[in-house]
Amino acid sequence: MKPDMMKAETRNTKHQTPNTKVVVSRIEGIEQAGHALSPEKVATTVSGRPIAPLYKASSPGGPNQANRDQANSDQASRDQPNGDEEPGKYPFKRGVHASMYRGRLWTMRQFAGFGTPQQTNERFQFLLQKGQTGLSTAFDLPTLMGLDSDNPRAAGEVGRLGVAMDTLDDMLALFDKINLEQVSVSMTINAPAIVVMAFYLAAAEERGFDWRRLRGTIQNDILKEFHAQNEFVFPPEPSVRLVCDVIEFCTRHVPQWNPVSISGYHIREAGSTAAQELAFTLADGFHYVEQCLARGVAVDDFAPRLSFFFNAHNDLFEEAAKYRAARVVWAEAMRNDYGARNEASWKLRCHAQTAGCSLQDKQPEVNLIRVAYQALAAVLGGCQSLHTNSMDEALALPSEHAVTLALRTQQVLAYETGVTNTVDPLGGSYFVETLTNELKADAATYFDRIEAAGGMVAAIDAGFFRREIADAAFAYQREVDAHRKLIVGVNAFVEPDEKPLEVCTAGDQVEKDQIAALRAIKKQADKTEIERCLQEIRRAAAGNQNLVGIIVEAARARASVEQIMNALADEFGRYQARIA
């Protein structure tokens, strides 16, 4: 609607309700402030990338330019002739599978975890009954930091932001009455990932499940903790060693398991741009590949099970382009730089989650709309599994009502919108193809900068990643504060009289119950056997032995998360981040 029409409508309000008049006046004010795009106004993506008013085949970075660049490339002549145009073929820009969602839908995997393991098990059962097709586990902050629930530092945090996990008995309770050979399971844990993975394997073994038939993913991506999320315990080098121990062990003993989910999600949540999320995530992945190769593991033995985890943010086209660029960059590097010959090693398979940082506590029902568009971006980008955030997550843990609506969002997207009817429906768009090429170029620039900084660990120690992310976050917030970027309900279309949303909370009794259960287990456990296992962990950590099997043995003895982490810290030390 044009500004002059808006003025007339604002004046002529005799037959309108008061609320209508207020909303119309607000829209007029926004347009008068210059927020209606004009032909000469420069638009930008959420990441601040300038957007042209029109894209053509001849645009810089567009299809014609890309084709010219490819024709001039010696490498291009050795590439498969139609690989850039066919989904399921190298370099997989249009998707890792030829039929994509026509053959199989993405896995609908809602993140869940709160309170005691028994409470989260009830939520898992609820979600499976509602039609969810995979489980995703959130752990509480003490577990993420390698602390037991009875540690004084854990006070007030037990079971608050995820499920408490102290010993093998908690893992058994968490997945009680769930067939682990039939349901794929994802676990979001990083610094203590090797410990939690050992608990999971010991629990599966105790319930009679074959490790070789287990399907799922453990996040186990410690590098992004140093970049963004800060849930690290040990220094970078031994931390990466533990990641690679899990990769190597699962390659040999749990072949259907994804032993790492190389994660850009948290990098984006900390305020990065889409290009930074793309570049830093893939750089982390390359570092893991190089470390596994250095220990003598063949690339085609482990690379097919590497997986990725990306954010699905608000800018629909930039996000879709990000996934497409990621697949191409990864495929080219795995084939050309790391010598992978198995096609499965070239494929970047990814999970996506809608942007938690975009959720607002004002007008929280509007978060439903944000999440729906973000989910659409992830699907248009070709994700393999998806979590949709609940509308109340800016306020509290999701209620059953909110999490049901979040799951229904995916189901409507899958079954009612037609988005699954053809593969890569945005393929060939001048705009999306240009964004894809620009993001690839931006990633290459960042790879060069990381190398110039001395490589991954040196760049971490220098504060490079944190500084880049902080600068991007500041730039975006400045745009919001200046009303150049509008957020509905926050700096535009504000509702002064909001009704509070009923939310789910974990009470103090959860912590009391979890501590009581842990103390009972510690009292009954064989302390001599636990100490023997911990000594074996220290001995192996001091050398080069893979630690997974040894920690599984400690889990069987009922050693706790904190006991095992302390034993590792005795050899590895603890890390203090540099403030850049």
Image: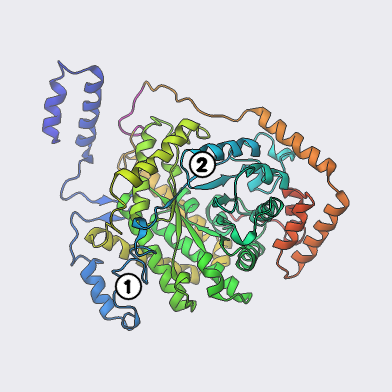
Q: Secondary structure at mark 1?
A: loop
Residue farthest along the top direction in this orientation: 14
Q: Main secondary structure of the magenta part?
A: loop
Residue at the image point whose x is 43% and y is 45% from the top: 355
Tell me the number on the disc at residue 83: 1
Is any part of residue 160 visible from this angle? no
Is any part of residue 467 visible from this angle? yes
Viewer-nearest residue: 182 or 375: 182
Crowd rating for badge 2 (residues with CA inside 10 Å; few <14, some 14–19, many 20+): some
Residue 531 image position (x, y, % from top left): 84, 54
Residue type at the position of mark 2? Leu
Residue type at the position of mark 1? Gly
- For marks 1 and 2, give the CA distance: 38 Å
Q: Secondary structure at mark 2?
A: helix
Res 238 quadrant in image: bottom right
Tell me the number on the disc at residue 427: none
Viewer-nearest residue: 107 or 425: 107
Crowd rating for badge 1 (residues with CA inside 10 Å; few <14, some 14–19, many 20+): some
Q: Nearer the viewer, mark 1 or mark 2?
A: 2
The C terminus: image quadrant: bottom right
Residue 134 image position (x, y, % from top left): 51, 48
Magenta residues (range): 489-496
Tell me the number on the disc at residue 128: 2
Residue 228 image position (x, y, % from top left): 53, 52
Q: Is residue 469 above or below residue 523?
A: below
Is 247 magenta? The answer is no
Q: Is residue 182 above or below residue 15?
A: below
